[in-house]
Image: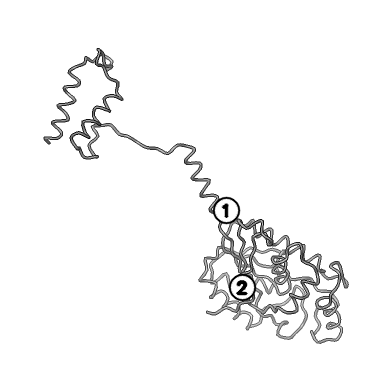
């Protein structure tokens, strides 16, 4: 209280030396502006070591300027845009036709083993903050996505961009050991040939590479940071090959990758896109792991 009285006394002394007009303005040779009064109070407070909470009605606010606010928001936006995107590519679970070694087209339902594999993948992926699932439109992929989605509680989007390569009609529905099937598959998948080689009505190397390019570019623009993608054996290999080689990929390179790297049912391949590495050879893409089996 003694401290407050001293300050109040100083103010009264200062005010007594000047007259106040009817509108509240100060007159006389020692008239001070409101800013100067604030300075007097501040000096008095400092001299008498008043607590910072005593302000006598004067409040000083430090507000960030508009440019500072804009710069801060821009920095936050850049950080979010530069954050890596992670993609969990999953080959669908085993189908009845897979188990019978039959070359399939769009058709093919999951076997009991395939459903169990999908459930294991879903249980495994629960440990990651996956925001959504993108699935091929083929029945075997849709069923796999539904089972995984039940574990992740994530929305599912369907796109024909992620379907399997279209096989030549001559081999669909036939056993993989059929001599005619072996001859055609060897000629298409295991022989070194020109990029634009086409046996009959299949989706050839050029077609599949272009679809993989669209897929990779689409995913690089996605807003979700963690996405599970349910796709197929050969198309998954093409996506991985395109990430590694980009437009330098040729049929001979793809043949080597296809021959030496298997893609099992329910295998998980993890890829990441790093926006700040956009000018690297892979345009910011990395293959983190390939064909991992889920461990629950």
**Residue drawn at point x = 72 percent, y = 60 percent:** 214
User: Crowding near pointer 2: few (<14 within 10 Å), some, many (20+)?
Assistant: few
Quadrant containing the N terminus in the rendered view? top left
Occupied quadrant, residue 248: bottom right
Along the line of sight, which residue is nearer the eye, 81 or 200? Answer: 81
**Residue drawn at point x = 47 percent, y = 37 percent:** 66
Marks 2 and 1, Cα distance to the nearest angstrom?
Answer: 24 Å
Occupied quadrant, residue 83: bottom right
Across and down, in percent, residue 162 comes to: 70, 66
**Residue drawn at point x = 75 percent, y = 76 percent:** 258
**Residue drawn at point x = 64 percent, y = 74 percent:** 290
153 left or right of 212 in image:
left
Across and down, in percent, residue 17 comes to: 19, 17
Number of callouts: 2
Disc ID at residue 246 = none
Q: In what element is the residue under mark 2?
A: strand
In the rendered view, would you say 241 is above or below 74?
below
In the rendered view, would you say 279 is above or below 147?
above
Across and down, in percent, residue 221 comes to: 64, 56
In the rendered view, would you say 89 is above or below 175?
above
Across and down, in percent, residue 103 comes to: 78, 80
Q: Which residue is tagged 2?
A: 289
- CB-based contact (under 8 Å), mark 2 and mark 1: no
User: Crowding near pointer 1: few (<14 within 10 Å), some, many (20+)?
Assistant: some
* Disc with the residue nearer the chain's start (2 vs 1): 1
Q: In what element is the residue under mark 1?
A: helix
244 left or right of 5 in image:
right
Q: Which residue is tagged 1?
A: 81
């Amino acid at each position: 209280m003694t401290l407050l009285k001293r300050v109040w006394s100083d103010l009264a002394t200062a005010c007594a030396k000047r007259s106040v007009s009817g509108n509240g303005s100060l007159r006389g040779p020692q008239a001070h502006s409101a800013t100067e009064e604030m300075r007097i109070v501040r000096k008095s407070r400092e001299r008498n070591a008043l607590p910072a909470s005593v302000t006598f009605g004067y409040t000083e606010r430090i507000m960030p300027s508009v440019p500072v606010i804009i710069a801060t928001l821009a920095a936050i936006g850049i950080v979010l845009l530069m954050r890596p995107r992670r993609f969990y590519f999953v080959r669908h679970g085993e189908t009845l036709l897979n188990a019978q070694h039959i070359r399939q087209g769009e058709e093919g339902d999951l076997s009991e083993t395939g459903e169990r594999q999908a459930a294991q993948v879903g249980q495994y992926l629960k440990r990651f903050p996956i925001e959504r699932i993108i699935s091929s439109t083929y029945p075997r992929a849709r069923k796999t996505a539904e089972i995984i989605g039940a574990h992740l509680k994530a929305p599912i989007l369907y796109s024909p961009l992620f379907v399997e390569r279209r096989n030549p009609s001559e081999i669909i529905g036939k056993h993989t050991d059929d001599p005619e099937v072996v001859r055609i598959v060897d000629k298409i998948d295991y022989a070194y040939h020109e990029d634009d080689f086409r046996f009959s009505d299949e989706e050839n190397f050029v077609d599949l590479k272009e679809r993989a390019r669209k897929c990779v570019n689409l995913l690089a623009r996605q807003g979700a940071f963690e996405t599970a993608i349910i796709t197929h054996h050969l198309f998954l290999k093409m996506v991985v090959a395109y990430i590694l080689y980009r437009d330098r990929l040729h049929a001979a390179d793809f043949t080597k990758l296809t021959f030496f790297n298997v893609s099992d049912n329910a295998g998980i391949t993890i890829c990441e896109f790093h926006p700040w590495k956009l000018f690297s050879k892979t345009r910011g893409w990395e293959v983190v792991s390939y064909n991992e089996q889920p461990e629950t």
